[in-house]
Image (spheres, rainbow, N blue to C red):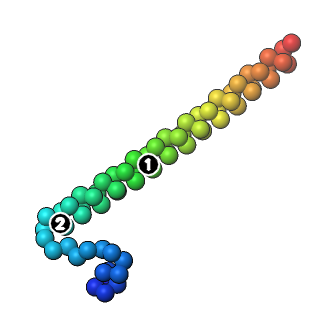
Amino acid sequence: MSEERVSKVGVPEIKTESALEERLSIFDAFVDHGRAIVNHANHIQRQQKEIEELKNLLREYLQQGEQHV
């Protein structure tokens, strides 16, 4: 990406090491947040699977009870 293009999208040039470290720190925070979102989504999916399994077990149990009545 050319310097001209960078200036058009409003990304200021990084001139010092501390500015670079600050940008990297912000980027790391975004990456960490993204990982947390993915982990949370995976946890929700696991819980949904467990709920479906429990529903199926309950249906089977209720059907067996109906057969014995």
Q: Quick one: which residue is furthest to the left in this view?
A: 17
Which residue is painted at 15% across and 74% down in the image?
15
Compare residues 30 and 68 and report the one nearer the observer: 30
Compared across the picture, whether 40 is left or right of 59 comes to left
Q: Quadrant of residue 60?
A: top right
Q: Amino acid at mark 1?
A: Ile
Mark 2 = which residue? 19
The number of callouts visible is 2
Separation (CA) of disc 2 from disc 1: 27 Å
Compare residues 28 and 19 and report the one nearer the observer: 19
Other residues around mark 2 within 10 Å, as few (<14) / some (14–19) / many (≥20): few
Compared across the picture, whether 60 is left or right of 29 comes to right
- Note whether 39 is above or below 18 in the view shown: above
Which residue is painted at 27% across and 58% down in the image?
26
Per the image, label 2 sits on a secondary structure element best described as helix
The x, y position of residue 40, in whole percent, is 46, 43
Which is more foreground, mark 2 or mark 1?
A: 2
Per the image, label 1 sits on a secondary structure element best described as helix
The x, y position of residue 41, in whole percent, is 50, 46
- Note whether 31 is above or below 65 in the view shown: below
